[in-house]
Image: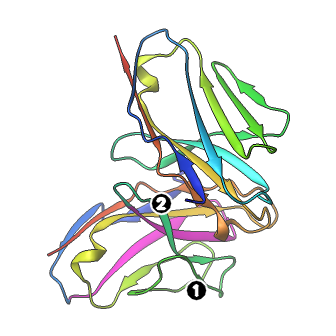
């Protein structure tokens, strides 16, 4: 089993739709969690950190389920500009980013 | 601020040749990292540095070396390039240990080894 696993997609949804994807992780001791966004041929950029209580940033909601070892990202009212690859990122040791594990990414394509 | 810059943007390199990929950050972050990204494999850590003067090996360090003479610069050297090192290379930094483990990435170097 991969340490961080994501559905590669692609998810192809119409503008305005709600889309959600999950990411599972294998290390139950993992301490911090993120969603990064990566546009084609560009660098990854932090979308949001994921907190135990769940957190929301505008149209984006992230949740963490420690019992089942997954994090999720929900995008409401999707825009064309949301088309990108979304990377799930897990850090088993907060004090060191050298152990951070990146998922392979989920491709999202929003159609007009 | 510029954040993190990388050079060159892209390069075609003959197998057996050496090359240094440059990375500079202006955020005064302690920690810096080098990743390679290959299709279907995600980002894999090559080397990292928790602070100036120290370096460590990541998941895929073979064939690469790094140095960290100061806070701002973290060059990655391929001593004798092989075709399997064809990849996109990203440099990143984070504010550990004082800050969070959020990483900030440079724009990447696209390297082709023939």
Image location of residue B53, percent across then percent down: 65, 88
Quarter of the image for residue B83 reads bottom left
Query: Which secondary structure lies at badge 2?
Result: strand
Residue drawn 74% across and 69% down?
A: A96
The circle on residue A29 is: none
Chain of the residue that carries numbered disc 2 in the rendered image: B
The answer to if B22 sits in the magenta stretch is: yes
Image location of residue B56, percent across then percent down: 61, 84
Q: CA distance from mark 2 to mark 1?
A: 25 Å
Quarter of the image for residue B32 reads bottom right
How many numbered callouts?
A: 2
| Residue that carries the numbered disc 1 in the rendered image | B69
Colouring mode (rainbow / by chain / secondary structure / one colour): rainbow
Q: Which residues are magenta?
A: B17-37
Residue drawn 55% across and 11% down?
A: A77
| Residue that carries the numbered disc 2 in the rendered image | B43
Q: Which residue extends farthest right?
A: A53
Residue drawn 66% across and 52% down?
A: A25
In the picture, the quarter occupied by the C terminus of chain A is top left
- Label 1 packing within 10 angstroms: few (<14), some (14-19), many (20+): few
Are tags 2 and 1 found on a single chain? yes
**Image height check: is B98 above or below A82?**
below
In the picture, the quarter occupied by the N terminus of chain A is bottom right
Residue drawn 77% across and 39% down?
A: A65
**Image height check: is A110 above or below B22?**
above
Return the residue nearer the eye: B22 or B88: B88
Image location of residue A70, percent across then percent down: 69, 43
- Label 2 packing within 10 angstroms: few (<14), some (14-19), many (20+): many
**Image height check: is B33 above or below B76?**
above
**Image height check: is A56 above or below B56?**
above
């Amino acid at each position: 089993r991969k340490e961080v696993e994501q559905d590669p997609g692609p998810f192809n949804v119409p503008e305005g739709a709600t889309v959600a994807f999950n990411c599972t992780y294998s290390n139950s001791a993992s301490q911090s969690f993120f969603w990064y966004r990566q546009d084609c041929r560009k660098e990854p950029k932090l979308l949001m950190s994921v907190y135990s209580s769940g957190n929301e940033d505008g149209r984006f909601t992230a949740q963490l389920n420690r019992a089942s070892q997954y994090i999720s990202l929900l995008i409401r009212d999707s825009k064309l500009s949301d088309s990108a690859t979304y990377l799930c990122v897990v850090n088993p040791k907060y004090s060191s980013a050298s152990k951070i594990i990146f998922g392979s990414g989920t491709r999202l394509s929003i159609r007009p | 601020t510029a954040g993190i810059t990388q050079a060159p943007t892209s390069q075609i390199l003959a197998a057996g040749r050496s090359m240094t990929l440059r990375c500079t950050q202006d955020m005064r972050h302690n920690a810096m990292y080098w990743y390679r990204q290959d299709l279907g494999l995600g980002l894999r850590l090559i080397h990292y540095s928790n602070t100036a003067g120290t370096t460590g090996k990541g998941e895929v360090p073979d064939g690469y070396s790094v140095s960290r003479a100061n806070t701002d610069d973290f060059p990655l050297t391929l001593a004798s390039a092989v075709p399997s090192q064809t990849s996109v290379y990203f440099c990143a930094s984070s504010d550990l240990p004082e800050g969070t483990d959020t990483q900030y990435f440079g724009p990447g170097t696209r390297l082709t080894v023939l």
